[in-house]
Image (cartoon, helix red, strand yellow):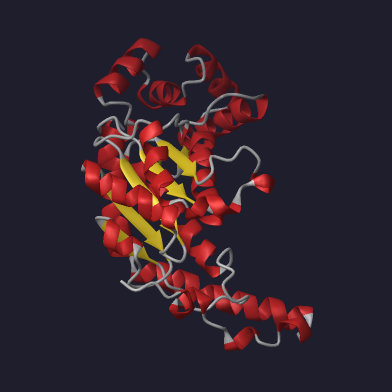
Amino acid sequence: MKDNLLKLTTEERNPNSMNLPHMSIEAATAMMNHEDEACTKAVQAILPVINQVIEICVDTIRSGGRVIFTGAAHSGYLGMLDAYEANATFGTTDEFTAIVAGNFTDMMKTDGSAEDVEENGGLDLQNRHVSAKDFVIGISSSGRTPYVIGALSWCQQKGIRCAGLVNNKHSIVAEHCDLVMEAVAGAEVITGSTRLKAGTCQKMILNMITTITMAQLGNVYENLMINVPPVSNKMRTRLEYILDQATICTLVTAHELLVQCDYNVKAALLMALKGISKEQALDELAAADGNINQLV
């Protein structure tokens, strides 16, 4: 495919924002809010392929592999954010992993040229010991980022499943992955500023991927977080409220059960719902691979 930056949807000029510097604040916020409505429609249009990606994520993690988000700049940061928040929400360790071009340690000092080095996309995956048991999702608004193309090309050479998340149709990234999620929401309010609608689409899709994957794997009960790491007083209190909401027990009882289980909320939840001992609860969870939804 011939690479032409100026023909990308994300590089088009948006007629609705041409007068942005002279708009009132009220008119500008209304305009941006209207533009963001396109994000929901863009994501809705590709739900079938998002569903396929989530199925692979579930299979990958269930089989002991990792889902790896890789990208450059803002796209990479969004992958990193969702991978990080999966830990805080679902108690994951490295089930969701992110690799950002340049392997930065300070976001404000990231080397912007890192996205141009195609071979580093594969090298960074290799250095993280990515193998055929893992699943790689390359994120690139333009669909032409060399670093992401390099990562996905390396995956294809190694027989590693991979998908792309882009914001333009018929992208170069699409030529180098098994599945491609093309969330096209139209021209940005600021021409080419893909942290806006493109980034919003990416965040919505990444939220779906991490949330629904974890729900399918048993880390959600009803619509409650049941694998929150008890790393602080705030988190331990949250777990007590979660147990209270799930079982309609008192907060005192919730606290007592969680202390007995060393704040293993799944075990405490089984004890409360089924009237069984801690040992029985742990045995049942082990037999169900930790998926409480198979037990209640």
The reply to whether residue 98 is in sight is: yes
Q: Is residue 54 visible?
A: no
Quarter of the image with the N terminus in it: bottom left
Instruction: State the image quarter where residue 295 is shown.
Output: top left
Q: Residue 49: x and y, percent?
A: 28, 61
Relative to 49, residue 231 above or below: above
Along the line of sight, which residue is nearer the eye, 130 or 6?
A: 6
Residue appearing at x 39%, y 39% in the figure:
123
Res. 288 image quadrant: top left
Question: Residue 114's spot in the image, x, y percent?
Answer: 53, 49
Report the residue at 61% width, 75% height from top. Answer: 33
The answer to whether 22 appears left or right of 100 in the picture is right
Name which residue lies at 45% across and 76% down. Answer: 8
* Above or below for 231 versus 66: above
Q: Which residue is at a point 29% across and 29% down the rendered structure image?
A: 64
262 vs 108, left or right, is left
Q: Nearer the viewer, residue 74 or 30?
A: 74
